[in-house]
Amino acid sequence: MLSFRRMRSLRKFVAVHASVYNHFNQERHLYSRTNFKLNRAAAFAEWRGLGSA
């Protein structure tokens, strides 16, 4: 938090970080490795689709 000079830029960063984190956070301990890899691949594919749009 100390690296941000303005509270506004901190809020903007946190908002973006939260949406990206929620997209990729898949609570790995709840899934088998196979399911985790499938879910992660789907998340990356969706992320690439959003980036090119």
Image (cartoon, rainbow, N blue to C red):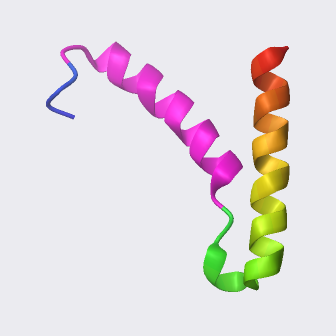
User: Horizontally, is 45 left or right of 12 in the view?
Assistant: right
Residue depicted at x 64% and y 71%: 27
Q: How many marks?
A: 0
29 to 15, vertically: above or below:
below
Residue depicted at x 85% and y 51%: 42
User: Horizontally, is 7 left or right of 42 in the view?
Assistant: left
Q: Is 9 contained in the magenta span? A: yes
Residue depicted at x 36% and y 15%: 8
Q: Nearer the viewer, residue 40 or 10?
A: 40
Principal secondary structure, stretch drawn in magenta: helix
Furthest residue toward left: 2
* Figure quadrant of the C terminus: top right
**Residue 13 on image: x %, y %:** 43, 26
**Residue 19 on image: x %, y %:** 63, 38
25 to 47, vertically: above or below:
below
**Residue 11 on image: x %, y %:** 41, 25
User: Horizontally, is 51 left or right of 29 in the view?
Assistant: right
Res 44 quadrant in image: top right
**Boundaries of the magenta span:** 5-25
**Residue 15 on image: x %, y %:** 52, 30
* Figure quadrant of the N terminus: top left
Res 52 quadrant in image: top right
53 to 37, vertically: above or below:
above
Residue depicted at x 75% and y 72%: 36
